Image: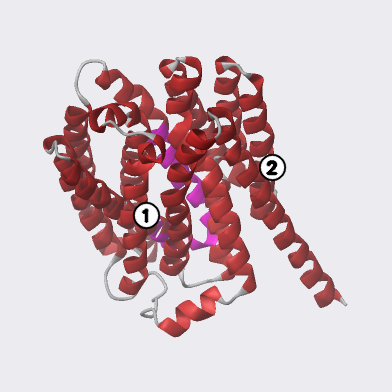
Amino acid sequence: MESSRGATSARSVTYLTAGVLLVIATYGLLSNYQSAVLNSVVESFHLTGGAQGIMSALINLGAVAAFLVAPMLQGRVKKTSVILTGAMILVFSFFLLGMVRAFAGFVVASVLVGVGFGWVDANCNAVMVDLHHDDSAKYLGLLHGGFGVGGLTAPLLIGALLTVVSWHTVSLLMSGLIALAALVFFLLLSSAKKGIPAAAKEQPLTRAGIRAFLFQKKNVMLLIATMLYAASQAGFLVWIVRYMTLQYHAESLGSIALSLYWVFGTLSRFFAPRLKIHPLMLFLLGVALTFVFQTIGVLSGSAVVMCVMGALIGLVSGHCVPMILSVASAVNPGQSSLVASSFLISIYATNIVSPLFMGALASWTSLNVMMLAPSVSAVLAAAVALLILLDERRAAAKQVA
């Protein structure tokens, strides 16, 4: 009887894990839609300067709003229900992007895309931690690897579609894709429900709980490191296609660079968690090497070298978000929703400002200076991670003494 229950439980966990991976891979594809269609959006609405980054900023604004609400649902609404709600918002918002032609409609649709992204992202991370709490680094790596699979598909698939249809039609196709993924997730969830082991009950979040979380020094430093990494990552991902188009007249190479980033970033997310290295040290090495490779790529003056550097940046930094989430989850046990939401808020809040700032920086200075900004963010993230590790070492030395 016990072995039968155990087999049912394991099967249910497998079903739900597969469903979450399917949703996150589809989300990974959709999240890179904005980079792939950036040139088309800029031309459609005649955007210039910092306004070229407005789509990314609006999406991230919506995501931050979703992340702010998500912790309030902790202990009140099932995370799987929020994933499904977020997916339905994405179905509607991408449909809206495909149908509207007025700029006001584009703004509303972009914000709604961000809301859907936020609820899907935060709750997929939280569900994976709940299902595999004792091995969260490995399974968060797998989760973000699934995101990477979607990410590496986006520029190739969407780039090919844009050669035959408009970006509005691509939006409609993306709406259908997430609808299909949501349906499969619902069916897997329905099959798994009875055998899923109960997660540790989370208490409804209170202001005191949030305050305690934010006033813990290590949490604050982890959040700062995450924001600096996010600025570096967004700087590359949002702008690489546009940069290669304007600087080298090589839009296709920009798409290739983006795909290479996701190919090697996905490999990093699958394999880095298996290394016997402290997750925070993996983060530190990742952002430090990102600084090196981003700088080499920009200063080389070669589109081909920039493509190669894109692959290397993905390889050394693709694992950074799951690693820092794993560290934060270990520091704050039993608060998976709060951890996922707070760190994703920090990422998306940074991504509101980063694309706009880089667009303005290009107007004020040059495209190369703009693309060096991610290098600066990466080296600052490395410095913060190093400080956290030194604090941990000092604390360990005091305990021994």
Residue 381: give x, y in percent of width and height: 64, 51
Does residue 236 show up? no
Towards the viewer: 49 or 305: 49
Q: Position of residue 376 (x, y in %)?
A: 64, 43
The amino acid on which the numbered mark 2 sits, given as a three-letter code, is Ala
Range covered by the magenta-colored residues: 126-151
- Residue 135 placement, left or right of 200: right
Q: Determine whether the residue tagged by mark 1 lies in a helix, strand or loop.
A: helix
- Residue 132 on the magenta segment: yes
Screen quadrant of the C terminus: bottom right
**Dot 2: within a 10 Å radius of its alpha carbon, few (fewer than 14), some, or many (20 or more) residues?**
many
Q: Residues within 10 Å of mark 1 (few under 14, many from 20)?
A: many
Q: Residue at horizontal 40%, vertical 36%? A: 49
Q: Residue at x 23, y 47 (%)?
A: 107
Residue found farthest to the bottom: 208
| Mark 2 or 1: the one toward you | 2
Quarter location, residue 227: bottom right
Give the residue number, with chain letter if any, for mark 1.
Answer: 124
Residue under the point 30% across and 25% down? 158
User: Residue drawn at (67%, 50%), measured in percent from left and top?
Assistant: 380
Please name the predominant secondary structure of the magenta segment in the image: helix
Does 20 sit left or right of 183 as displayed? right
Give the quarter of the figure containing the N terminus.
bottom left
Which residue is labeled 2 in the image?
288
Front in this rendered view, residue 102 or 309? 102
Q: Amino acid at mark 1?
A: Cys
- Please give the count of numbered marks on the rendered protein: 2
